Image (spheres, coloured by chain):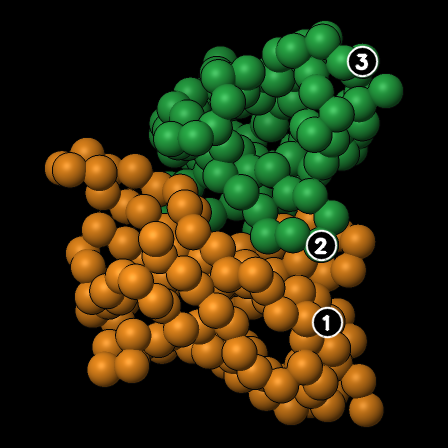
Amino acid sequence: QSALTQPASVSGSPGQSITISCTGTSSDVGGYNYVSWYQQHPGKAPKLMIYDVNKRPSGVSNRFSGSKSGNTASLTISGLQAEDEACYYCTSYTSTSTFRFGGGTKLTVL
Amino acid sequence: QVQLQESGPGLVKPSQTLSLTCTVSNGSITSGHYYWSWIRQPPGEGLEWIGYISYSGGTYYNPSLKSRVLISVDMSKNQFSLKLSSVTAADTAVYYCARVEILTGHKPVYYFDYWGQGTLITVSS
């Protein structure tokens, strides 16, 4: 089961916006609105940032937003802050009742 | 707030079976709104989903690991467990347990909302 496709790295300056893409297939990302995004700082457990493509859990900043078009989901972070520097992973529920994770994207805040 | 805690030996010999337990606190493992999952992360690499179990014992596994994985649940102890057989150095990773929310009210959802802190398992002789 191969990973969903994410860019290995993205970067942006404080205050800017960045977008991370997550590409799958019609059997996962494109077929269901069960895409979620996780933030992971070094040495820490992942933290849920977005679920159901575009919903934010309580306590997550509204600077984080999600969307989907076809087989590609996206995470956008606006008003970049130094604390946003982390690795971000997408995941999708699939047609075979399994989960696929993306390979992860390292966000650097310049 | 729900808490999950992994426990198990930090070192496993090649060809042996890795065994881990996840203890769930401040929440019941018998709720029909959740699955219980294992996820791992090799050093410096990304996350890999291993599998999940429902409180009734139904399981789904990553096809790439399916022949070696067994996830079970112990409702009396509010725990679920992972066994991974015939381990090699490639199985060295931080292993996380996580809760999967599958229902919000009557609406299906599928995401990992609570995670354990993770435990490093090294496969080495």
Farthest residue, direction top: A16
Task: Say which residue label 3 marks.
Answer: A13
- The image shows residue B123 at horizontal and vertical percentages of 74, 81
Task: Say which residue label 2 marks.
Answer: A43
Element marked by disc 1: loop
Instruction: Residue at 80% x, 85% y: name it.
Output: B124
Q: Which amino acid does label 3 sit on?
A: Ser
In the picture, the disc for residue A80 is none
Viewer-side residue, B93 vs A80: A80
Q: Colour of chain B?
A: orange
Q: How many circles with numbers are drawn on the protein?
A: 3
Nearer-N-terminus badge (3/2): 3
Element marked by disc 3: loop
Q: Nearer the viewer, mark 2 or mark 1?
A: 2
Vertical side of B55 occupied by A61: above or below? above
Q: Is residue B2 left or right of residue B28?
A: right
CA distance separating discs 3 and 1:
35 Å
Q: Residue B61, can we see it?
A: no
In the picture, the disc for residue B92 is 1
Q: Chain A is drawn in which colour?
A: green
Instruction: Residue at 62% x, 46% y: name it.
Output: A2
Q: Mark 1 lies on which chain?
A: B
Q: Is residue B36 left or right of residue A35?
A: left
